[in-house]
Image: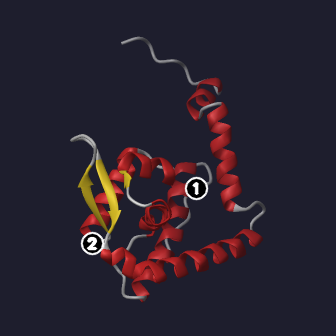
Amino acid sequence: MTEVPDREAVGTLLRHVLEVLDGDVAAVYAERGLADYRPRFSPPLRVLVADGPLPIRDLARRVGVTHSAASQTVAQMARAGLVELTPGADARQRIVHLGARARELLPVVEAEWAATSAAMRGLDDELPVPLAEMLHAVLDAVRRRSLRQRIADAGLPTPPPA
């Protein structure tokens, strides 16, 4: 295991935690012969199962990511044969549909999701505050007052006009 980032390097620490957690979930898929399946595929896959075909913009909103992030994930999923894209109402819109391979893998993905959710509840029992609860609290706090504003309030001088 790599060394843990400094406590002051919060962004690096968050990325490190995500890499550790996602790496373990990816290893679970690899152990089941699905080395090309990424943990980031499960939220869009689950939304498509629940809601049916969606434009990328709506899929992004339902998953809680940017349009750009959803577009990149959908492209990776299409390369893995998990989704198919069809034209939407205009040339800019693409509709995402579950592919046959995704339907095939759904029992494995659903089982992993349930097991991972149970594992996270167990991990939460070891933490002072459940991880998702803390992350939502962070998002709420920076929505109220951005980190950028907090940095300015901490005394960083405003740059001179260009």
Q: Residue at x 65, y 30 (%)?
A: 145
- For the residue marked with disc 2, what is the amino acid? Gly
Q: Is residue 21 visible?
A: yes
Farthest residue toward the top?
A: 161
Residue that extends furthest to the left in the rendered view of this protein: 91
- Residue under numbered circle 2: 81
Residue 56 position, x and y percent, is 36, 50
Which sits in the foreground, 10 or 112? 112
Numbered disc total: 2
Q: Is residue 52 above or below residue 65?
A: below
Cβ–Cβ under 8 Å for marks 1 and 2: no
Q: Is residue 22 placed above or below 140 in the rendered structure?
A: below
In which quadrant of the rendered image does the C terminus lie? top left
Q: Which residue is mark 1?
A: 6
User: Callout 1, which amino acid?
Assistant: Asp
Residue 55 got which mark? none
**Render colour scheme:** secondary structure
Q: Residue at x 41, y 11 (%)?
A: 161
Q: CA distance from mark 1 to mark 2?
A: 40 Å
> Is label 2 in a helix, a strand or a loop?
loop
> Is residue 54 shown left or right of residue 80?
right
Find residue 128 and report its image quarter: bottom right
Give the x, y percent position of residue 78.
Answer: 27, 65
Residue at horizontal 43 percent and vertical 81 percent from the top: 29
Q: Position of residue 126 (x, y in %)?
A: 75, 72
User: Which of the two discs, 1 and 2, labels the residue nearer the N terminus?
Assistant: 1
